[in-house]
Every structure is written in structure tokens, then in C-alpha cells.
Amino acid sequence: MKSLLILLIFSSGFITNPEIPNFRLKNLDNRTVAFNSIKGEQFTVIDFWATWCKPCVKSIPKLVEISDEFKDQGVQFIGISIDGPRNLAKVKPFARSLGMNYPVLLDVNSEVMAKLSVRAVPTLLIVNSDNEIVYIHEGYKAGEEIEIRDKILSLLGE
Amino acid sequence: MLRICSLLLPLLLLSSSGITAQIYGSNTFEFQLGNLPFEDDRDYSTGYNQTNLYYDSGNISLFGRFEQFLSPIEERNYTKFTQKSIQFQDDQFRVRAGNIYETLGRGLLLRSYDIPGSVFEEAFERTRYAFFRDLEGFAADFTSDLFEIKVLRAQPLFNPLPPNTLPDSLRRPDLAEAIQANVYLNNELSVGGILMRNQTFGSDFTNYGALMSDYSISDYVQIFGEYAFELEDAFGFNSENDAYGIYLGSNFYRGSFGGSFEYKSYNNFRIGSGYNDPPSLIKEHTYPVLNRSTHVLDTGGEHGFQFEVYYNFDDGHALTFNISRAVNNAFLRFEYIEVFLEGLYQVNEQLSVKSFLDYANDELKGEENRISLGFITDYLFSNGSGVILDLQYQQFDREEFDLATGEFQPNISSNVYSSIAYSFSSDFILAGILETSTDPQLTDDPTTFITVEDETRFWLGTNMLYRANSSNTIELFAGKRRGGPACTSGICYEILDFEGVELRLTTRF
């Protein structure tokens, strides 16, 4: 039986790049949304952050600028807050006061974070239209937004 | 195993017929060689490994977590398949079975969690294991534009017990059955309710309920509330024995200004073995001197508020002010009050300066006039590398028992945290950390009963982090690491002091 199970798993066909599942999370208006319903036509940039994350305060305004630059080119930014119930009340004003004008989702139980093997915040993923992860960037220090912007440019140019 | 295979077989047969599937996951391996403080000088080497494996095919997902702990002492070791789950999900409907996570409402009645990547070390046997509180059972939910409904029947994990101490069935003493419904009356207003019952070690069920609502007064102001209670005590929260939890709050923003106000009140509100883990009252800090000075919620009797405002300036500066107060009244009355101010100043593109000032009184711990302050500079060199200098200081008054006089005497204790980190890039960071404390509760060697050591204690350690690529990360620690309470994502737990070498390898595949 075990051999059969393994055989079936391996005969199901694989994808080289890890693929984002169509996860569902609540947004800042307390509504549940599916990833596929808000993802970008060409690329989706997913930024994992938290209200208590100090580097996130620095990175988010830079990401907002990049989001504004590429939003008409099929690139959609999505912020995923990993704040738990203790800090949930702070997420919306925090996001808005930092100018986040793209969808913000709430991963209260860290389920999506765990599934995508995200271990720290901020972590940024770029996902293509087939939901494949094509770029991962962990941490942030000043100037690294240039690397992220260049990566989006190169992906759009491919 | 045979039963699991039988269950999975039809699903895999279905999913393998023309639908693309994938297996992916992560692995964490941690090796330690070292000692706990005040322990005999003996090297104790342990290895811990955690593998998380996911299988997705169409709407079906499978998950398994495998953990292994190895040490020279056989009875502390284990090799276990600690989590497994199966899920079906489409755009509106989701059903899950096995080890799952769910939070009801704002987490007053039930909250489960996983802190990805965290490894918890149990104090008694020094057994390490993944830090999570999952639910083992079944859950289903349905979401539409008008309403949302979820049901579950599951056993929460009592995670203070390590996986090798007791069989998994005994680590799950509680059984929770619940149904939650939320109705979206319009774009601004939603109302909802929860019915839940709990059984502990096969006792009679205790019934709970909750009412909740979210209302957006305008684009800039939102209010919310949840009242959870034991059904027998509904709306009788004047009695000392009634079990209830109240969480009221509001958040607001305008331009670069934002803030929140929260009021919470808990009375006799420990459900089962304490798995409900409702949100605590005070701010969670990330600065080490403040994070470990946290006030842990007592659901037996505690009420208070937290108010926070912040302003993010256009040129990268930011200012945050927070005040919080918690009053414990389960047995004796203890008050905790804290005022916090934090500023971030972006001097130029290369240099930023962050500082904080915090004042607190913690009657439960006997800490008065606790003052904490910190100064952190972050400098970026022209070649892309950077250096972060972090200096934090804390002092407080606390009466200590004097063995010579047999009386409590006033005493001032201090804690210092200092670190310097050099980052070649985000992928390669070297850091040195020096901590000191004059707190008698830390300087005293508990193995010498008559003598009270009061010499300043030092912890000196070095950290290295290297991300070889997007899949592999290496972390190395050597030296002494200070333990104590720690809070992450609203979850508080105890970290043990450690002296030695620790290597961690993380792989994503």
C-alpha cells in the first residue's frame, strides 16, 4: 500500500518551480478573498510583513512606490500581514498610514506563511501568471528596493 | 498508516488523472552543543530535524510534518509524524481534516497557531520540538458575499508537553465543537455569533457563546467588538464567578496618521486546558529589553486598555506613542501600566536613527519605575554593506529579600543589551551581542541555596546568517545566549539560556 501511495504521488507530474496555491484570506474589510481573484495579470508581488516588524516600516513605502510604477503593466502587489489577534486592530491604520494602496490580507494563523516556507518578515515573493514563484527576497535594508525593481523590470522584459 | 493510505488513495487517483500536481516543503535542521547555565560543565549535543511536506493537486492539498530529536539520553529522543492533514478548497468552500489551524472570532474562544521556523526547548528535559498549537479533527467553512459560516470538531494540542512525554492522545485533553456565522449586512456592517462547547478529559460539556460585530463608521474609522461568555452566565458579567471575555476596539487613520484603541476584560475565562489564548492587553515589543519584560495575560481576571497613535512622515521619519494598562483581579489586585514612545529619523539615504523610551510599573512582578531606553543606528555604506549598532538599557526598582537581615530591602536592577551587526548584504550578516544584568533573580545561582550571588552576569555571543540562495540558509550561533520570556506574533513562551554552539540549516524545496 505504501509503495502504491508513493508511486501515485510520483506519477502525478511535477512542476519545477514551486507554485502558489489558491489560498484564501480575509482582507482589511473582514471579507475573505482568494488569491486568484486578486493576482496580477503578469506578475504578483507578495510582501509578508507585520506591524511589529521594524524593517517593514522602511520597506513598505518603497514597495508602494514600485507598485505605483508597475500597476499599469500587469503587476499586482499584495501585502500579507502575519499579525495575530493581539495586533490585528493595528493592521489597517498601520497599512493605510504607510500608504499601502494595494490589497492587504490577514494571515492570522500563519498558515499561508508556513505553506510558502516563509520564516521571517519582511519576505517578498514574485509570482508569475501561472502562480509559479520566480523570485524570493528575505529581509530588507535600504537600497534593496532597487534590486526588487530591477527584477520586476527584467521579468517584464522576458 | 494503512487507514491514511486508504483514505488518500481515491483522492490521489482522482487528482493524478490529468491535473498537474506538486510536492514542495521545507526542512529545518538544528544542532546544539552546549550547556544550560549553572549546569555541570558537561557538553550535551543534540540534533533536531523538522520536515514539512505539502502535496497540491487541483483543489486537494495534503500536508505532513515529521520531527526528530536525538540526544545522548535515549528516553528524551523521539521520531514522530507530528502533523498530517488533508484539505479540499474551492473559491467558496473549504473542508479540512487532520491537524488544522482555526481562530474563532477575534480569538477569545479559540485560537490556534503555528510560528513557522520556531523551535521550542522544554526546560525539564531539554527536548526540542516545533512550537505550535494546532487542532486535530475536522473543520469546514463556506464564504459568500452575504455570509460566512464555519464549523469544527477538534482537539487542541496542549503544547507545553513535548511529543515524547505522552502519547498524542493524552496531549489533547480537550474537545471543542463550534459553529460560527457572520452576516455582512452591507459594506460597512457585519454581525456574527459563535456557539461552542468544550469537554476536558471526558467531563461534561461546558457551553460557550459569542456575539461580535464590525462597523466601518467612515472610510477612516472602524469599530469592532466581541463578547464571549459561558452560556450559563450569559449577560451576567457582574458576578465574580461568571466566565466571560470582552474585546472592544476602534482603529482610525487619516493620511499618514493612524491609531487604535482597545479595551479588553476577561473573567474566569480559561477554557479547558487554556487553549483559547485570547489577545492580551498590552503592546508587544520587539526590542529585547521590552519583549522579555512582557506582561502575560491572566484570563482568570484581567481588564485594561491599550491606545496607540503613530505618524509616518513623508521623508521616512516615524513617531509612535502607546499607553497601556492592565489590572489583574483574579486573587489579589495588581496593576500594570506602560507608556512607550518611539521615533525613527531618516537622517539621509545612508543613515537612519531609531530610539525609544518606555516607562512602566509592574506590580505583579514587583517592578516599579521601570525605565527602558534604546538607541539604534543603521548606516549603509556606498558598496551596499551596512552596519547596525543597537544599544538598549533598562532599570527598575524591586525589593529583594536580604538573607542577612531577614527583611525585604530596596534594590535597583539593570539590564543592558548591545549588539553590532555588519551586513555584507541581506544574505550575509555577522553580529556580536553583549548582554548584562544585575537582576538578583538572574545573578543568583539557584544551586547554591545559602549564598546569593550578586555579581553582574554577562552573556556574549556571535551570530552569523548566510543565505546561500533562495532555498538554503545557514545560521550559526556561538557563545552565551540570554533566555527568558519571549513573545512572537502575540504568543509568549519561555526561551532557555544557552551556552555553546548552535547550527541551523533551513532548506526550502
Image (cartoon, grey):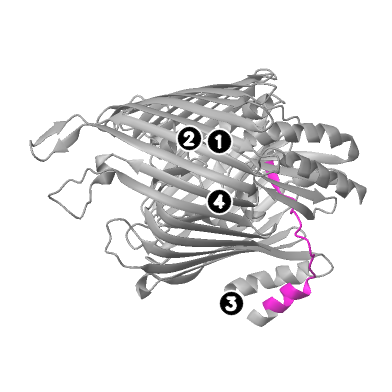
What amino acid is labelled 4 in the image?
A: Leu
Residue under mark 3: which chain is it in? Answer: B
Q: Are discs 2 and 1 located on one and the same chain?
A: no
Q: CA distance from mark 2 to mark 4?
A: 26 Å
- Residue B382 in the image, given as x and y percentages of width and height: 70, 39
B309 lies above or below B421 = above
Element on which disc 3 rests: helix
Q: Are discs 3 and 1 located on one and the same chain?
A: no
Q: CA distance from mark 2 to mark 3?
A: 45 Å
Residue under mark 4: which chain is it in? Answer: B
A38 lies above or below B42 = above
Which numbered mark, 2 or 3, is in the foreground of this view?
2
B74 lies above or below A42 = below
Element on which disc 2 rests: loop
Residue that label 2 marks: B284
Residue that label 1 marks: A52
Q: Marks 2 and 1: CB-CB under 8 Å?
A: yes
Q: What residue range appears in magenta?
A: A5-25
Residue that label 3 marks: B2
Question: In which quarter of the view is residue B508 placed?
Answer: bottom right
What amino acid is labelled 3 in the image?
A: Leu
Q: CA distance from mark 3 to mark 1?
A: 45 Å
